[in-house]
Image: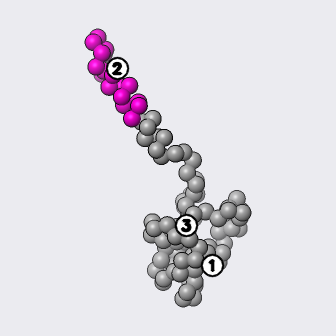
Amino acid sequence: MHIAFAAPTRLWRRALDVPESTTAGQALALSGFAAEFPEFTDHPPAMGVYGERCDERRVLREEDRVELYRPLVFDPLESRRRRAAHRRETAQRGARPGASRV
């Protein structure tokens, strides 16, 4: 099985050979992630298997890839709202008489 984490500046991956019935939490502990990323020692990151969120008790299969997720640095809903407001403002400016179009 594999474990992966997309750090801000690099991709961290480990291939692990673990016994059957190993959980995602056990695989995380065996991977050396805590030594590499000590900032997550007190609060491990959210995890999933192939994009499906799971908790540390999930029993892994041989070819599973455990993914560790960083916390969001912004609210996606708020970003969508800002983009929509920007598009509306841009459209209104372009619709005014005498407004220059590029």
In three-dimensional space, the C-alpha distance between marks 1 and 3, rounded to whole angstroms, equals: 12 Å
**Residue indicated by mark 2:** 93
Q: Name the amino acid, label 2.
A: Arg
Discs 3, 2 touching: Cβ within 8 Å = no
Q: Is residue 81 left or right of residue 3?
A: left
Nearer-the-camera pick, 35 or 80: 80
Residue 60 rendering spot, x and y as whole percentages: 51, 80
Does label 1 or label 3 sit earlier along the sequence?
1
Residue sitting at x 57%, y 80%: 23
Answer yes or no: do the residues labelled 1 and 3 have beta carbons within 8 Å? no
Please report whichever mark, 2 or 1, sits nearer to the chain's N-terminal start.
1
* Residue occupying the point 61% across, 62% down: 45
Q: Is residue 18 above or below residue 47?
A: below
Viewer-side residue, 11 vs 30: 30
User: 53 left or right of 38?
Assistant: left
Quadrant of image for the C terminus: top left
Other residues around mark 2 within 10 Å, as few (<14) / some (14–19) / many (≥20): some
Question: Which stretch is magenta?
Answer: 84-102
Residue 83 part of the magenta segment: no
Q: Which mark is residue 26?
A: 1
Q: Which mark is residue 47?
A: 3
Residue at image point 66% right, 75% down:
29
Could you tell which of marks 3 and 2 lies nearer the N-terminus?
3
